[in-house]
Amino acid sequence: MTTIKRAGRAAARLAGDPPDWLVRLRADPGAAALGVAWPDESALREEAEREEEHVSDGIMHTDATIGHVREHRPHMLRVASGPGYAGTNGFEHEAAWFVDTREPDGLLLAPSASYPTFLWIPAGTTVDGMRGALGGLFPTPRPTRVTLPKTARGFLGYAHQIGVPNVYDGTFGPIDGLELDRYYTMNTFTEVQSWGSAILDDPSPDEALSPLQAMARFRECREQSPGVPSMTWRTSASGSYVSIEAHMGRIFVAEARYRPNPNPEVIERMNAEFGSAFPTDLPVDVVGALIGFDFQTLEVWERELAVEEDPGHVLGKMEIAVALAHGDLDAAERLRPHFAHRDPGVRAPLMTFALNYNLEFLLEELLLTEPDEQMAEQVHRILDRGTGDAHRDLFEEGADWGDEDEDEDGDDE
């Protein structure tokens, strides 16, 4: 919870003497057609006279991101609300529209009043501008897996190095399914229902469940299929899917399935402000759900692998790259040259990575030219009997902090 103290009297002055564009916009019936409601003059003055407000978005802020909120939020005046939109299990949400009293030259859209200021969407001074800011948000019907056409994947970190805050006392601890569920339940960007890899699509009902029904649904939705375990949440505003995957018992990867954000300048500006590298077509709620984690895409690791010569660093970076390529045959194809490393001491672990993800087509091709007969025979035997399951369910077992001592490239020190 962040307490924001209103800055000076600028909000009261703006409410008493709004700019011409805002007067015109309040009188335009097109805004009501978008589901936007304007407060009357007395309600607007009352909002402007509030000396402080309490904001909670439930995310892992860095010093820079919370600093942005504390710098800019005191100057923001809420001038409209809506549209409202329904979440899962009967939860209701509402968008909010603000004006920056320092430069009152247009509206800013927050999909929820609790959104941090760096994810607000410029909306201009017209109904068309408002409609453009709402693009991609609050879709009906809610998207399904097959109607979310784009995928973005990013490395979050090693299981023994990253964590999430306990929702009760704020202390950081290892990631497991319970702590992640608690974290995303309190997160303003995601719906409360999560599901495991055994379920492909959002199983949440549109209406609220009784406590007993909710407990039964929770148990059913935690099931994991063989292979890489994951937990997935739907985001509240865009209806995207955000998944956290646990690879090889030690690596966390995030995957977003989404419809492209038509306002990429918001994420471009945020990346420039904080040095992050989120794909700029990600919806704002997807980015919000991942704030506090690194999100390093496969392209980052491909660039590093192109110039890396140290064998240990090659292995560390390839382990991450193969995890990021999981489920994407085009990406696996791009990594193919790295599997044919000249050093047999590197090739053997690389083949193990391929085995862990059942990349049999890649292994069969590599074996055609493998000069180490013993290694080739061993891999053939493994392929004949099946590769097994190399991915521990960290959501059930939990990650062990401090068990490994690795640098950022995954090498033992």
Image (spheres, rainbow, N blue to C red):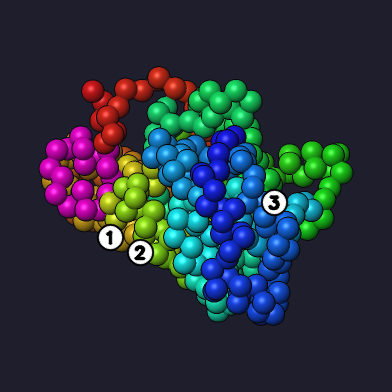
- CA gap, disc 3 to disc 1? 59 Å
Within the magenta stretch, is there residue 310? yes
Magenta segment, prevailing SS (helix, strand or loop): helix
Q: Secondary structure at mark 3?
A: helix
Q: Which residues are magenta?
A: 301-318
Whether the residues at callouts 2 and 1 have beta carbons within 8 Å, the answer is yes
Q: Quadrant of residue 84?
A: bottom right
**Would residue 176 appear left or right of 384 to someone viewing this image?**
right
Give the farthest residue toward the top.
402
Residue where numbered disc 2 is placed: 330
| Nearer the observer, 193 or 79 | 79
- The C terminus is located in which quarter? top left
Tell me where residue 111 sits by quadrant: bottom right
Mark positioned earlier in the residue sequence (2 or 3): 3
- Report the disc number at residue 48: none
Disc number at residue 46? 3
Q: Indicate the amino acid at tag 1.
A: Arg
Comes first in the chain, label 3 or label 1: 3
Q: How many marks?
A: 3
Task: Please name which of the two marks, 3 or 1, marks the residue nearer to the observer.
Answer: 3
- Residue type at numbered disc 3: Glu
Report how far apart the C-alphas of labels 2 and 3 lie in the structure: 57 Å
Q: x, y percentage for residue 104?
A: 48, 63
What secondary structure is found at the residue carrying circle 1? helix
